[in-house]
Image: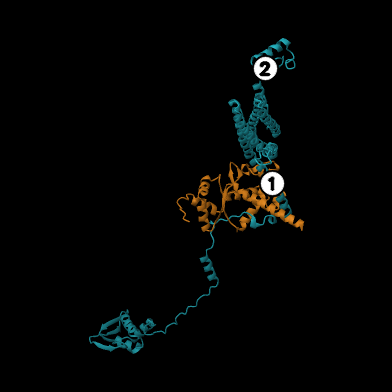
Chain colours: A orange, B cyan
Amino acid sequence: MIIDLKILSQLQTLFKKLSSGSHLNRLEEPEIWVDLETHLQQYETLFSELGFALIFDLRGFAYFKNDSASSHTSKITRRLALFFLLLFEYQADNGLHLVQFQQWRVDNVLIDKLCQNYHAIFEAEDIASAANLKEILDSATRIGFAVFENGAFRLLPAVHRYLDLFEELAQANRSDEIAEESQ
Amino acid sequence: MAKIYADEFTTQHRERLQQLINTELLVEMPHSQMLQLDENVRQFVANLLHEHELGLSEILKLRITDIKTGLEQLQLAVENRDMSALQRGAYRIDKQLREILLQLEQDFHAIQAIAERAKSADEKMPLTRRYREVLEAFDRYVEPMNDLMDTGAGGNFYPLLEHTERVLESLGEQLAIQGSLYNHQLMLRQVGFRVKELREKGLSTLKHATNTLMPLREEVRRNDKLSCVISYLIGEVRKKGLQRTFPLDILPVWRKERANAIYVGSELLNLMEQVRGYEPKTVEFPDSLAKDSSLLLEQINPEEIQNHLYQSLPVADLMRWLLENYAHYQDITLLRLYHKLIRLPNISVEPENAQSLITLKQIKLQLHSHALKSL
């Protein structure tokens, strides 16, 4: 396959972003997204030759799949998973539309409330204060799971990765339980 | 009238009625004292009242039976060649079809409105309340409609329409064979067209309704599922802890490929490894060389020699005196001493007239030696 690098106009920016471990989100960087979507096959081939597995999700995000993580990353990702769990639970309790999480405004008030509501569970994970929660969100922002604007965080489509994981995990656990019960 | 305008008199009531009749809102019924609302006005008001109500498929079912009887009527009329009955039957079916069409139109708008209301409602409003209308509409309208419009054997309405079409066509053919009035054939054909129109319209309305409501309904379903999953997982976290609920190998991870940090390169590591096993090399220095006495300066004590000279004065020939006393010194030392001694103070120095030849260790000297006397 011959890849004309000239037509991959966003190659440099895209590679810089993805190889830094970050996620590309459609609505945040529409120009790069459009270029990636148009020349998806070329990009995929090019990256896979370089040893990167590009994952392109039609819900509006793309990233390099990676299996190994540094100890720092594994700590962050686990904390993020917990944070998303509790945030979604809290929002669901308030009757909010979970699938439309991109419209939420995660501001100080909300973070404080989360901290109060789930104090015990956060503390068990060494997340003692709202400041710790904000640190987690800051890391999420660097990786492309959220964006900080007008004094509040906003979740990005890449969060679907965690939601998918939740569903997968719950299903797997349930089928395990069913299997155990039937034995 | 008397109820609404209780404080007015009968004459005033009559005037008001007359006004309504004059504006043709009310129509006098023939052969009676009764008044009725103008048909157009009545329908308009009814439409206003029912605008956002979904025409229930129940009503549709009633209309279906009516159409069925209309069809039977038509068939009978053709058999009996009763043209007025034919007209009545056709009119009956046509009227029902038109009303169904109108209703479908209304449903179309009603569904659009429901979807828009659900989407645009305050997003802080609980989801179940926001989407309740959607869910109800789906259950009460779309599902039964689906059944009715089913093109297969299970459907009710759609097959009926097809049947109606076929019956009308065959009746039209019969009429043509019988050579009846063109007008009548035209009438049947018109009804036939309307059936076709309705069939398409019904399908498109249903499709539209499903397309509009289905995503919303799916959204609600996904939402419910997600919230269910999340509360379950939180329970797991509480029970088993975060680490065991989320094994690392399934969590999303990422890695920075181009690190900004500085790492120790392999070259440096090699170097450090070498340093760890460092043993100093022994270098053999050369032994010190044997002293070459001829090259080295001799140690002399000039003062002693000077004093010796002063005591030996007068000396007739300085060079001979030096040779007698200090012949063991090297030639160069003797010559230096010679020059030094002739410059001593308190001594008169006289060169000899005769030239003498003196052989030293390595050199021969030809000189006019000096005689020294004390002053």
Query: Could you tell me how far apart the alpha carbons at marks 1 and 2 are, in whole angstroms?
Result: 57 Å
- Please state the horizontal and vertical placement of residue B292, each as a whole percent of the image: 39, 84
Q: Nearer the viewer, residue A85 or B99?
A: B99
Rendering quarter of residue B249: bottom right
Q: Secondary structure at mark 2?
A: strand
B93 relative to B276, above or below: above
Rendering quarter of residue A97: top right
Amino acid type at circle 2 is Leu
The residue identified by callout 1 is B225
The quadrant of the image that shows the N terminus of chain B is top right
Q: Which mark is residue B87?
A: none
Please report, as a chain letter, where disc 2 is located: B
Q: Is residue B210 in sight in this rendering?
A: yes
The residue identified by callout 2 is B26
Local crowd size for mark 1, using a 10 Å CA cut-off: few (<14), some (14–19), many (≥20): few
Looking at this view, name the residue that lies furthest to the front. B178
Q: Is residue B299 left or right of residue B108?
A: left
B9 relative to B275, above or below: above
- Please state the horizontal and vertical placement of residue B177, each as a whole percent of the image: 60, 30
B232 relative to B375, above or below: above
Amino acid type at circle 1 is Lys
Q: Secondary structure at mark 1?
A: helix
Q: Nearer the viewer, residue B57 or B212?
A: B57
The quadrant of the image that shows the C terminus of chain B is bottom left
Q: Is residue A112 in sight in this rendering?
A: no
Q: Which sits earlier in the primary sequence, circle 1 or circle 2?
A: 2
Q: Is residue A30 left or right of residue B178?
A: left
Q: Nearer the viewer, residue B254 or B279?
A: B254
Q: Nearer the viewer, residue B89 or B84?
A: B84
Please check whether the numbered discs 1 and 2 fall on a single chain.
yes
Please report, as a chain letter, where disc 1 is located: B
- Please state the horizontal and vertical placement of residue A132, each as a whole percent of the image: 65, 50
